[in-house]
Amino acid sequence: MATDEMTVQWYNEHAAEYTQHVRNPDESVYHSLYEKPAMYALLPDLQSKSVISIGCGSGEDAHYLAGRGANQVVGVDISDRLIEIAKTSYPECQFQVMDMEKLAFADNSFDFAYSSLALHYLEDWTTALSEAHRILKQGSNYLFSCGHPVYSALETVQDDDELMIRQLSRTKDKKLDTASVTGDYFTHRSMSDKGWVTWHKSIDEISAEVTRAGFVIAGVHEPQPLPGMKDVSPKDYDTLVKIPNFIIFKLLKI
């Protein structure tokens, strides 16, 4: 299932402001103080390795991976505008417009694959994961992050000028012996936010797609925000130390 056209259009139309956002650490605290440090801490030794960044956006992660000693870093993204920005910004890396479900590389081409918050734009991840598996060498890892299903299971019960309340809860009426549930963890469904579409799926569903693609799960990590977020954005820090927003999977091709 390809990335929704609305999502591709949004990233092309807002490529410049998106790039400005992710490159400003004080503004993109979910990147600079949460997801990126956790992802980077899980990187293997990249010295003299061939690396692919899948869904590379404007190229910041590819640039970082090159700085970790990789001798070849290729970034691919479906947004042609983001790839234009990446090419201009980080000439030491190679960037191509490419669908992550149709990677135009030979089998066993790369030593490591990396993807930050990209797979969740697809309804079914099996094809994209299978393509990553195909182009990786035996014994290589694929590290990717996505939205945490606990967070996307929350249901908005109030959103007005005063309050926004999202819940995953069970309420039991003891007298009537009935129960009601707010939120939904298990139902596979799309979510539209700010002009793009992502997909909610349970960890069980993610695990099944990983297995179908031929990978073994070598690790599952639920990041915690860096302490510095408490000073920059205390409301986000107080949320993230209790409710995860992202989850990271480390896969192995055996």
Image (spheres, grey):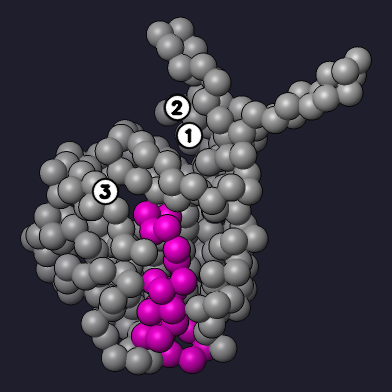
In front: label 1 or label 3: 3
State how far apart marks 1 and 2 are (Cα): 5 Å
Q: In the rendered image, which quarter contains the C terminus?
A: bottom right
Q: Is residue 153 above or below residue 85?
A: above
* Dot 1 amino acid type: Met
Q: Is residue 147 above or below residue 207?
A: above
* Dot 2 amino acid type: Ser
Q: Which mark is residue 229?
A: 1
State how far apart marks 3 and 2 are (Cα): 28 Å
State how far apart marks 1 and 3 are (Cα): 29 Å
Q: Looking at the picture, tell me which residue is in the foreground, 158 or 37.
A: 158
Q: Secondary structure at mark 1?
A: helix
Q: Earlier in the sequence, mark 1 or mark 3?
A: 3
Q: Is residue 151 left or right of residue 6?
A: right
Residue 172 spot, x, y in % from top left: 82, 23
Q: Is residue 83 above or below residue 27?
A: below
Q: Earlier in the sequence, mark 3 or mark 2?
A: 3
Determine contact: label 1, label 2, CB under 8 Å.
yes
Residue 175 spot, x, y in % from top left: 91, 15
The residue range painted magenta reads 120-140
Give the residue pinned by disc 2: 233
User: In this rendering, does residue 27 appear at all?
Assistant: yes
Residue 212 spot, x, y in % from top left: 55, 77
The image quarter in which residue 90 lies = bottom left
